[in-house]
Amino acid sequence: MSNASAAKGSEGSGGRWIPLESNPDFDNIVWIQWAKKAGLVTSQARFVDVYGLDEELLGLVPRPVKAVVLLFPIDSKGEVKRNTEDDRIAKDGQPKIDNTIFWVKQTISNACGTIGLIHSLANSAVTFTPTSPLQKYILECHDKTPLERAKTLETTPLFANIHAEAASDQTVNQTAVQEDTELHFTCFVEAPEQEFRKIAKQGGTADTGMRLIELDGRRNGPIDHGECKDLLKDAANIVKSRYVTGSSSVLFSMMALTTAPEGSY
């Protein structure tokens, strides 16, 4: 997939950050910088590039994949699709979605990269350094609403500082000064069906599966894209059908969070 150089967050009341880089040469550097400073144990999980949506290129991504992050261009056609989907969800609901998914409403402009990182890491059962900023944030916000989580993010200087350090390093972020961009990060994870957790709490078993969940801070909440059998392939299919098809832009980029050891496929 083609890569782009910045990402824009939705405008909100929480201020404005420098956008994070997404560039074919520097993606992993910037994201690993952020993740390591925030508390990810990078010897046990890492971000890798996804170079295309066809099966052969997806096969190059080390498994298992715990999350998929997409950078995509914001355009009028896409906004119409997303608004229509949000209206449908508001009307019909999403009965199978897991209500324990950690989702943060984005209120800080240009923070979509950090929101995407939080969404991918907080919902992937990866290991964090004890008392690290990310572990503290997740524990503190576990029982908070999405807007309360956003407020906590706004008022936690350490996250803003980590973001700024990763975004403003000109050796890895060649376009940090281009703040007014029309690109955005979203994230895909898998989560068990709501019924599965209910029955599990009662000590029973159920023949229920995993759901493909999209987490985008600009939306009204998590988006259930249906059954998930293979996170990377299923996310790639959604990206292809919902984002790439019909778009004339080449400014798309994908990364995967994997727990595979370095050098493995």
Image: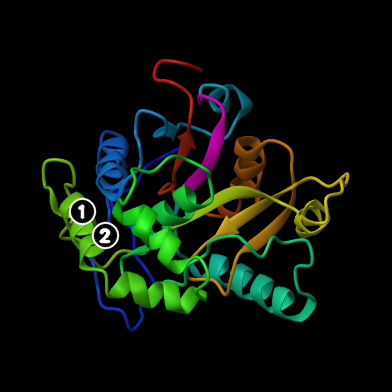
Q: Residue at x 60, y 64 (%)?
A: 222
Residue stretch in magenta = 61-69
Residue 54 location (% of width, % of height): 60, 30
Nearer to me, 72 or 128: 128
Residue reaching furthest to the front = 203
- Nearest the viewer among 220 and 102 is 102
Is residue 38 depicted above or below 27 in this figure? Answer: below
Residue 19 numbered mark, or none: 2
Residue at numbered disc 1: 167
Left/right placement of residue 50 relative to residue 243 reads left
Q: Where is residue 200 in the image (x, y as percent from the top left)?
A: 79, 51
Would residue 78 be visible to someone looking at this image? yes
Graded by Cα atoms within 10 Å as few (under 14), some (14 to 19) or many (20 or more), the crowding at tag 1 reads many
The residue at the point 18 percent across, 47 percent down is 173
Mark 2, secondary structure of its residue? loop
One can see residue 248 in this view: no
Please provide percent x and percent y for residue 119.
47, 56
Q: Is residue 110 above or below residue 238?
A: below
Task: Describe the colour scheme in one phrase.
Answer: rainbow
**Residue shown at 30%/39% (left/top)?**
32
Circle 1: residue type: Ala
Q: Seen from this angle, which residue lies furthest bottom?
A: 13
- Taking the spot 33% from the left edge, 84% from the top edge, the residue there is 13
Quarter of the image for residue 18 reads bottom left
- Mark 2 → mark 1, Cα distance in angstroms: 6 Å
Give residue 181's mark.
none
Closer-to-camera residue (210/7): 210
Q: Foreground: 219 or 84?
A: 219
